[in-house]
Image (spheres, helix red, strand yellow):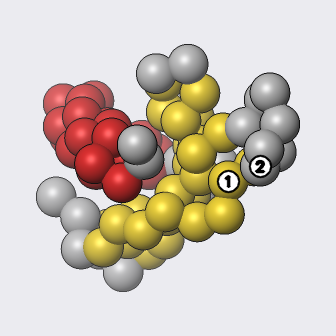
Amino acid sequence: MFENFKMIEPLFEDQVHERHQFVVTMEGEEYTGILEDGEIIWYHPKPDAVKADEQMNEIEIEVKKLIGQQVK
């Protein structure tokens, strides 16, 4: 699915609009995004440009699970 996942410094840290930010590596390409209100918002480039909808659903489920494990 993806080779690497890591959390990076949150956006708006310690503010009411704080967002968890992450980087995912797939097929040698890095994709960055944030988790906002339970939904993943991808920055450019967006992985859905090269991945099918079904693959994107699986990727986003796994990313949400990993964020949940690391953010308490």
Q: Is residue 21 above or below residue 31?
A: above
Figure quadrant of residue 2: bottom left
Name the residue that disc number 2 marks: 13
Q: Position of residue 47 (x, y in %)?
A: 44, 50
Q: Are marks 2 and 1 in contact (CB under 8 Å)?
A: yes
Figure quadrant of residue 27: bottom left
Closest to the observer, 25 or 18: 18
Q: Is residue 41 left or right of residue 14?
A: left
Q: Position of residue 28 (x, y in %)?
A: 36, 80
Return the mark for residue 10.
1
- As helix, strand or loop, the secondary structure at mark 2 comes to loop
Q: Position of residue 17 (x, y in %)?
A: 78, 29
Q: Is residue 53 above or below residue 19?
A: above
Q: Is residue 35 left or right of residue 19?
A: left
Q: Position of residue 66 (x, y in %)?
A: 28, 50
Q: Looking at the picture, which amino acid does disc 1 mark?
A: Pro
Please name the residue shown 66% across and 39% down the image: 19
Q: How far is the residue under mark 2 from the one under mark 1?
A: 5 Å
Please name the residue shown 24% across and 74% down the image: 3
Quarter of the C terminus within the rendering: top left
Closest to the observer, 18 or 14: 14
